[in-house]
Image (cartoon, grey):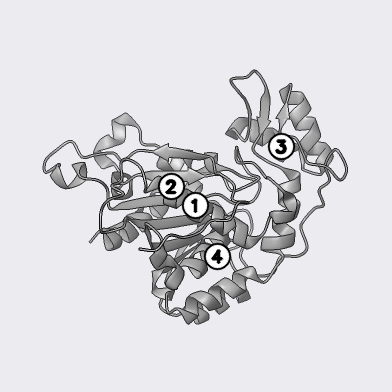
Amino acid sequence: MSAFAFQSSRVPLHSAFYPPILPSVPPLAPLLAPPNLLLCYIHGLDSSSTTWGPFLSVDAESAESTPFHRSFPSYAVDLRGHGQSPLADPSQFTPDAVVEDLTGFLSDVVSRPPFDPTSAIPPKVVVVGHSMGGRVAMLLAAKLAGALGSSLPFELSKVVIEDMDVKVRNKPPFAVTWEPPGGDFDRAFTSCDDCVSALIKSGYDEKRVKDWVVDGRIRNTQEEKWWSDVNPQTRALCYERILGSECGADAMEAIRAEEWQENVTLVVAGGTGPRGTVCDKESLEKMKRRLRGCDYFTVENAGHSIHKTHKDAFSSIIDGICRQVAE
């Protein structure tokens, strides 16, 4: 297997690791061997790995009904400029760079325990992306579905796109600015009030920002500082270079060209409005036509974050995918 050459501009991604939950009854032997499957979860815009915490966490009281997908190692990542991952040089923020970050992250993960880097059979990977993370998952699939994927120490087996289309979104719903003008936004603050004030001043709605204090995107750190997972500078870059570009449509066509569409799953919230999809209907129909053979699920009244509002339904879909891959 030839080695994949990473660029020096690659950003090391922060992640939250959720170890596999093993069954309490035999047979244990197959699961005690090095795992042959891992799941990687990608958040959306203005979010971070914390969005997946409630979905991936299992209470001790409900351990008997643990979803099948939690039998395997799970990693929720922070994309560059989100969560605790650095933004690095903004001029190098491109779709290709984001894909390379993820490729490097997955390559690093499978090179250490609990995986066996000496195995002749590379571990399989299922990537689940919410919202913009779904578009990033498509970019990853477009890059790795061809010959390049064979040079890596893992096999990308499936991608799941949660409530995202390929529409060019070049008109953000609101404009953002940040201090200092022309400089980089510092996500570390001396107090919660300073952090909240800076984000509101940057253009975010006050209620939304205060909700982020509750859900953990704004939080107190061990260094007695306050940290924002949200970065208005990154938001602007995402709209300019990912959401507002043709990269989603290009990725779709690349997946089609490689005849890889049967490995794609689209999960969309039914209806519109607060309890429905944010996806463009015409764009979704185009995706279904161009990715003929992909799996398509609609979860009614779920809202944009299906993994939060309809956890059991979304978990069941991920279970089914993992059973296919693990066979």
- Report the residue at 43% width, 52% height from top: 107
Which mark is first along the chain, 3 or 2? 2
Type of amino acid under label 3: Val
User: Residue lying farthest right?
Assistant: 181
The nearer-to-camera label among 2 and 3 is: 2
Using residue 147 as the reference point, say whether residue 228 is left or right of it: right
Residue 273, quarter of picture:
bottom right
Q: For mark 3, what is the residue?
A: 209
Residue 13, quarter of picture:
top right
Type of amino acid under label 1: Gly
In the picture, the disc for residue 104 is 1
Report helix, strand or loop for mark 1: helix
Q: For mark 4, what is the residue?
A: 139
- Asked if marks 1 and 2 touch (Cβ < 8 Å), the reply is yes
Question: Where is residue 269 shown, x and y percent of the image?
Answer: 52, 60
Which mark is first along the chain, 4 or 3? 4
Type of amino acid under label 2: Asp
Nearest the viewer among 247 and 112 is 112
Query: Taking 152 as reference, is 212 above or below it?
Result: above
